[in-house]
Amino acid sequence: MRMKRGADQLPSVPSPTKVIGSIFRVRRDLSLVVKKHVLQSASLTLEEADVLMDLFGASKLAWEDPVADEDGYVAFAALRRSLVHSSSSLSRRIAALLSAGLVETLKPRERARAGEKADLKVVLVRITKSGVAKISPVYERFRSASERLLRDIPIEDQVALVRINEQVMKAARWAS
């Protein structure tokens, strides 16, 4: 499908399936990098690390997705939507992280008893100090691996990639 580029030829336009397919292939390859270089010796699955990273980012780094409240809690539903990896067994994953002391939950009635208005359907989750200690080195390895992966990509291409990814995410959310 690719034409040879000459002085009078434009590059071929990739099909929409090639563009979206490339996103899936990048995700696959990035998952391999994370497993091999980021999660080394962390004794966490990729999915557990995904949950802890989102809770860490929300409460300690002020990430926009998911959003933590002033006490560092994230609504269970917001956490489910923010995950990169499978959210199908999120309840079991949270239960395992809870038993390990890496997260804590706050049930709606517990918050209501503290004198706050609460939506009685919303369960909140936050990372504990032990969870922060567990995920902080993972985050640092992730940051370092990200820098290495992007080292040879010009900053304007990185900016364009973020902008394009945001547009694709917006279109995907609209379509779902």
Image (cartoon, grey):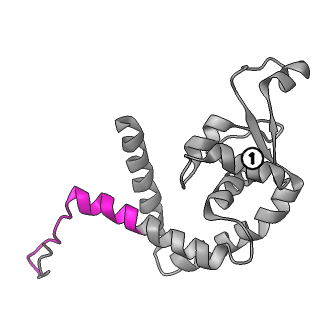
Relative horizontal placement of residue 74, taking residue 89 as reference (left or right): right
How many neighbours does mark 1 have within 10 angstroms: few (below 14), some (14-19), or many (20 or more)? Answer: some
Instruction: Give coordinates of residue 155: x percent, y percent.
Output: 49, 70
Relative horizontal placement of residue 56, taking residue 65 as reference (left or right): right
Is 167 placed above or below 1 here?
A: above
Q: Residue at x 32, y 58 (%)?
A: 20
Three-letter amino acid code of the residue under disc 1: Ala
Q: Residue at x 24, y 58 (%)?
A: 17
Residue toward you, 22 or 168: 22
Residue toward you, 61 or 112: 112
Is residue 156 something that shows in the picture?
no
Instruction: Give coordinates of residue 93: x percent, y percent.
Output: 68, 51
The answer to if 74 sits in the magenta stretch is: no
Quarter of the view holding residue 176: top left
Q: Residue at x 74, y 47 (%)?
A: 95
Is 78 placed above or below 36 here?
A: above
The answer to if 10 sits in the magenta stretch is: yes
Q: Quadrant of the N terminus?
A: bottom left
Relative horizontal placement of residue 137, taking residue 79 as reference (left or right): right
Instruction: Give coordinates of residue 105: x percent, y percent.
Output: 80, 39
Quarter of the view holding residue 8: bottom left
Instruction: Give coordinates of residue 149: x percent, y percent.
Output: 53, 77
Which stretch did the figure color magenta?
A: 7-25
Q: Name the residue carrying label 1.
A: 95
Relative horizontal placement of residue 35, taking residue 16 as reference (left or right): right
**Element carrying mark 1:** helix
Residue found at the very far left of the displayed protein: 8
